[in-house]
Amino acid sequence: MTSLPLISVDPDGRGRRPAMPPRHLADLDLPGRQALVTELGEPAFRAKQVSNHYFGRLVRDPERMTDLPAATREKLAGTLLPTLLHPVRELACDDGATRKALWRLHDGSLVESVLMGYPDRVTVCISSQAGCGMACPFCATGQAGLTRNLSTAEIVDQAVYLAGVAASGAVAGSPPRLSHVVFMGMGEPLANYARVIAAIRRLVAPAPEGLGLSQRHITVSTVGLVPAIRRLASEDLSVTLALSLHAPDDELRDELVPVNQRWKVSEVLDAAWDYAATTGRRVSIEYAMIKDVNDQPWRADLLGRLLAGKLAHVNLIPLNPTPGSRWDASPKPVEREFVRRLRDAGVSTTVRDTRGREIDGACGQLAAAEETDSDPRAATA
Ligand code: SF4
């Protein structure tokens, strides 16, 4: 019998009480912020003013909050807007259209976010956990395991920070306003369920409550935590579900996505179709194309049969191999044949662009590189 790998869905991470960051206004709804401001001895409406600066104007420097009395700016900003993300590196590629940020959190954990500019939209890819407990063998983040869940504000602040970068005009050839958020950075979002849902509510609420994005422009990815997918369907949120399938058969998926040993392909697809039926949203099926592993024509045909007639779209992802990995990307002719077979089966299919390759764009690669650079043991390992 195959034993289950160490998959953590413990909301606090590894059963220990994690070192969570200081409370930030993005952890709270507006009434919660007003209560906090009142505790400071300030009028409740100050919460709305600071929230407008943060979410509406993307301003976090108290000196620029000139509608607040000078004497209380530091106190209010210090309490409501503690610094959560300390930049370690910011790298750009694709002629500046892709910018990757590596952050150090208050406890030393590293997380990554990516800003991607397109002619018609600006997308950020954000992390929901420091590390990940899902143990997918082809993924850099999965190799290091889970450190901890991010707080709601640590998740939201990645998007707000990069919305500010976009608003500064740093992404040439793209609109200045952040429009899309994808939860496809480090971590399994549905393993940090409550904080991710709270973060989504902040991202979609209009200012001053939140960032005012469209629900339809938010994508939540999962490896297939079936109970959490069903719970997400009941949240009355029209976000897109992206299911990281990577294999159409249990034998291979048990290896590539170890959580499959708990919830099989048929169960996870059933949950996805129920999600589509409840929300009316097309499910995005993510499939990393791995040379000689999951890219055979028969697997394309099997996937086509599973998805034909369903409210689904396949996103094929050319694998971005991690250094020293035994996994490699499928050759282009193999990829084209896979696409052809899926389309012949009537399944809408696209190949995702490979943004950020030059800057370790796949989740976890930049953090892994930083850990190696700064870990003296790595030199002798
Ligand atoms: S692919 Fe996603 S779910 Fe799997 S280990 Fe990596 S970050 Fe976690």
Image (cartoon, rainbow, N blue to C red):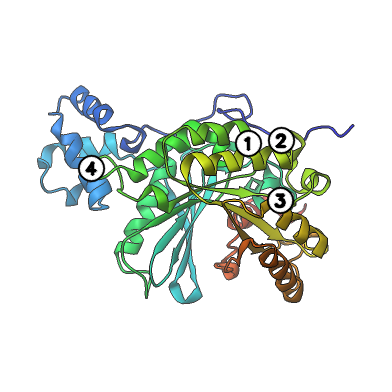
Determine which residue is flagged by label 1. 225
Determine which residue is flagged by label 4. 208
Determine which residue is flagged by label 3. 306
Per the model, the C-alpha gap separating discs 1 and 4 is: 33 Å
Q: Position of residue 176 (x, y in %)?
A: 31, 65
Q: Position of residue 114 (x, y in %)?
A: 48, 59
User: Along the line of sight, which residue is nearer the eye, 360 or 56?
Assistant: 56
Looking at the rendered structure, the secondary structure element under dot 3 is helix
Q: Position of residue 376 (x, y in %)?
A: 67, 51
Label 4 packing within 10 angstroms: few (<14), some (14-19), many (20+): many
Upstream in the sequence, badge 1 or badge 4?
4
**Among all residues in the image, which is located at the extreme right?**
1
Looking at the rendered structure, the secondary structure element under dot 4 is loop
**Quadrant into which the N terminus falls:** top right
Determine which residue is flagged by label 2. 263
Looking at the rendered structure, the secondary structure element under dot 2 is loop
Quarter of the image for residue 6 reads top right
Q: Amino acid at mark 4?
A: Pro
Number of numbered callouts drawn: 4
Per the model, the C-alpha gap separating discs 2 and 1 is: 7 Å
